[in-house]
């Protein structure tokens, strides 16, 4: 028998194909039994086509068609017919035509699915993840993956055009420090030793520069064993990039070109060059190092006013080197209840509290907590803030960075409540001039804000040991609508500077040698200046396909507890496997 061959997809036939004999294959999306006539919507990745079975033409065929149920996989041969006037379906790409079936093959039948294969479903995410193969059949999901594919292809073409080589780096590797916990893989051949899954290919890509590869990129899985937040996955995909002899400007230009192509896929035009903001300004104005610049509510500094105010909590804080910052929520006229809710929000994110000054529509002012500071201070705050009738001023005091962060979160929360963020805005920008280090009070030592291979700004270098807090990094983040979509840096390419950084980070010489000896050694054999960046692919696809969860753009994601509900991983392994690895499981 001649092999049955599909001639068209379910998404491509139009009136121009009138009379053509075709073979379609796909899933039974829906069927409607109208007595003599039976209609089947046949679905594949590309769309849906209506098949018609007519009992008058072929009773046996019609009888067979009546046995079809949702999600059966079938093949049908038939003739394309333009639908009668008024019977077209404008919602369907193939809505002008139908295929009058002459032959039918049931390629496989299907059990009743636990949820319908359609876009609007109310099924729990657990069930969707358990039956992920069914979930992925839904047209919207397939659209997400079409977009993901378009994006990765666009990036590959672009990077190739820019002279970058795609190079794979190992998955079984030595721990690389990106600040998260490693996933470990026990070695069978060297008992007691472990590979780490890469948190990123950071050291490998830098070594490729030492090898003279000049321009590297990779669309690569990275693994971080973190407690998962809504937009995190234990394994995720980065567009990882490194180049030799870069200037920050060439690197920015190259990434901006890529972004403009990627976002261009959705008709979104990115300004070039992209705006830039320093870390300091971003913190001071937005209370965040990933500022959402789509709405113009800015943080302000009121510390000086309170230093001169009557004795009050705020004066005490201002005088002891802490800060008092605030923002104006325009035209909010909040009720007491709403203000309590807002205070509860601040507590919930860890803030000590929030004070407010409410400017009533009638010109009255209420400012319960701030009142102690005296009427003059309240007046001065209102004047400086530029607040008007109906506005609310929120104030927070405490250590600078924490206070800015809390206020920044409040800014976003208010934007959400008040709908300050206009739809259809795409604000992408670079955040630059990050501090190199931050003090980790729990570990009682300086830690890298980015990673330990980030170069300090040259003129700050003499202060490295004496004033670590003052050192700026040659690091940059790419931010879109308040989400960090990428980050990178110009690297240290001299082993003496790299060693000094390790020392400031509290590594002893032997510790540094043990962890990164291979890398320090490599740096000694002629290292070109180099730098790079990694962009989060999942988030980018999520944003471009209008989804709110990265799980909707990852084919087989894990839950917040890092479980794959479909395959049931992680799972226990056999005693035999454990024995081979020399591993014993402790019960507690
Ligand atoms: N490896 C870094 C990261 O994953 C990015 C970079 O510095 O290129 O965040």
Image (cartoon, rainbow, N blue to C red):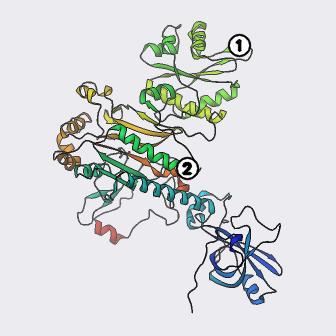
Q: Which residue is drawn at 22% across and 48% down?
A: 519
On screen, residue 185 above or below 340? below
CA neighbours of label 1 inside 10 A, class few (<14), some (14 to 19), many (20+): few
Is residue 224 among what the camera can see? no
Is residue 503 among what the camera can see? yes
Of 206 and 562, which appears nearest the observer?
A: 206
What residue sits right under mark 2 in the picture?
Answer: 544
Question: Quadrant where the C terminus lies?
Answer: bottom left
Q: Provide residue 107's location: percent of width, then percent of height.
A: 61, 82
Res 293 → quadrant? top right
- The residue lying furthest to the bottom in this view is 1
Label 2 or label 1, whichever comes before in sequence order: 1
* Residue 177 in the figure: left or right of residue 56: left
Q: Provide residue 488's location: percent of width, then percent of height.
A: 37, 42
What residue sits right under mark 1 in the picture?
Answer: 364
Q: Provide residue 135's location: percent of width, then percent of height.
A: 60, 63
Q: Provide residue 194's location: percent of width, then percent of height.
A: 28, 58
Alpha-carbon span between mark 2 and mark 1: 46 Å
On screen, residue 391 above or below 96? above
Badge 1 marks a residue whose secondary structure is loop
CA neighbours of label 2 inside 10 A, class few (<14), some (14 to 19), many (20+): some
């Amino acid at each position: 028998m001649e092999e049955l061959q599909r001639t068209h997809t379910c998404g491509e036939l139009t009136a121009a194909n009138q009379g053509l004999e075709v073979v379609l294959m796909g899933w039974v999306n829906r069927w409607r039994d109208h007595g003599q006539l039976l209609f089947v919507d046949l679905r594949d990745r590309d769309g849906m086509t209506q098949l018609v079975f007519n009992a008058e033409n072929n009773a046996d065929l019609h009888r067979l068609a009546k046995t079809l149920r949702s999600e059966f996989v079938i093949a049908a041969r038939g003739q394309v017919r333009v639908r009668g006037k008024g019977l077209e379906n404008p919602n369907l790409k193939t809505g002008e035509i139908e295929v009058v079936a002459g032959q039918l093959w049931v390629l496989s039948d299907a059990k009743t699915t636990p949820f319908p294969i359609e876009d609007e479903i109310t099924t729990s995410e657990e069930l969707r993840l358990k039956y992920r193969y069914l979930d992925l059949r839904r047209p919207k999901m397939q659209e997400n993956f079409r977009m993901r594919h378009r994006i990765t292809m666009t990036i590959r073409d672009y990077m190739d055009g820019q002279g970058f080589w795609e190079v794979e780096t190992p998955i079984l590797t030595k721990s690389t420090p990106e600040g998260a916990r490693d996933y470990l893989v026990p070695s069978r051949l060297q008992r007691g030793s472990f590979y780490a899954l890469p948190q990123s290919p950071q050291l490998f890509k830098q070594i490729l520069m030492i090898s003279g590869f000049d321009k590297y990129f990779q669309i690569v899985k990275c693994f971080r064993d973190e407690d998962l937040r809504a937009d995190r996955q234990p394994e995720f995909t980065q567009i990882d990039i490194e180049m030799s002899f870069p200037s920050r400007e060439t690197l920015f230009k190259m990434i901006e070109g890529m972004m403009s192509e990627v976002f261009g896929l959705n008709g979104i035009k990115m300004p070039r060059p992209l705006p830039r903001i320093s870390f300091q300004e971003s913190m001071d104005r937005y209370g965040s190092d990933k500022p959402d610049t789509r709405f113009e509510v800015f943080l302000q500094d009121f510390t000086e006013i309170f230093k001169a105010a009557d004795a009050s909590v705020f004066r005490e804080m201002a005088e002891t080197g802490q800060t008092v910052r605030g923002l104006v929520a325009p035209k909010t006229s909040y009720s007491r209840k709403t203000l309590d809710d807002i205070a509860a929000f601040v507590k919930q994110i860890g803030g000590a509290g929030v004070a407010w000054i409410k400017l009533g529509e009638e010109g009255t002012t209420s400012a319960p907590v701030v009142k102690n500071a005296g009427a003059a201070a309240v007046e001065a705050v209102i004047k400086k803030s530029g607040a008007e009738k109906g506005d609310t001023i929120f104030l927070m005091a405490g250590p600078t960075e924490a206070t800015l962060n809390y206020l920044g979160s409040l800014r976003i929360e208010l934007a959400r409540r008040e709908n300050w963020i206009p739809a259809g805005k795409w604000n992408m920008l670079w955040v630059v001039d990050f501090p190199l280090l931050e003090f980790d009070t729990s570990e009682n030592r300086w830690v890298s804000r980015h990673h330990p291979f980030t170069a300090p700004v040259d003129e700050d270098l003499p202060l490295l040991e004496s004033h670590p807090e003052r050192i700026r990094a040659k690091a940059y983040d790419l931010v879109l609508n308040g989400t960090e979509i990428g980050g990178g840096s110009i690297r240290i390419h001299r082993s003496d500077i790299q060693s000094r950084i390790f020392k400031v980070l509290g590594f002893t010489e032997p510790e540094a040698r043990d962890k990164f000896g291979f890398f320090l050694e490599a740096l000694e054999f002629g290292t070109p200046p180099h730098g790079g960046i990694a962009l989060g692919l999942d988030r980018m696809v999520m944003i471009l396909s209008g989804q709110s969860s990265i799980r909707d753009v990852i084919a087989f994601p894990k839950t917040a507890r890092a479980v794959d509900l479909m395959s049931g991983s992680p799972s226990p392994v056999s005693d035999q496997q454990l024995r081979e690895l020399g591993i014993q499981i402790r019960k507690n």
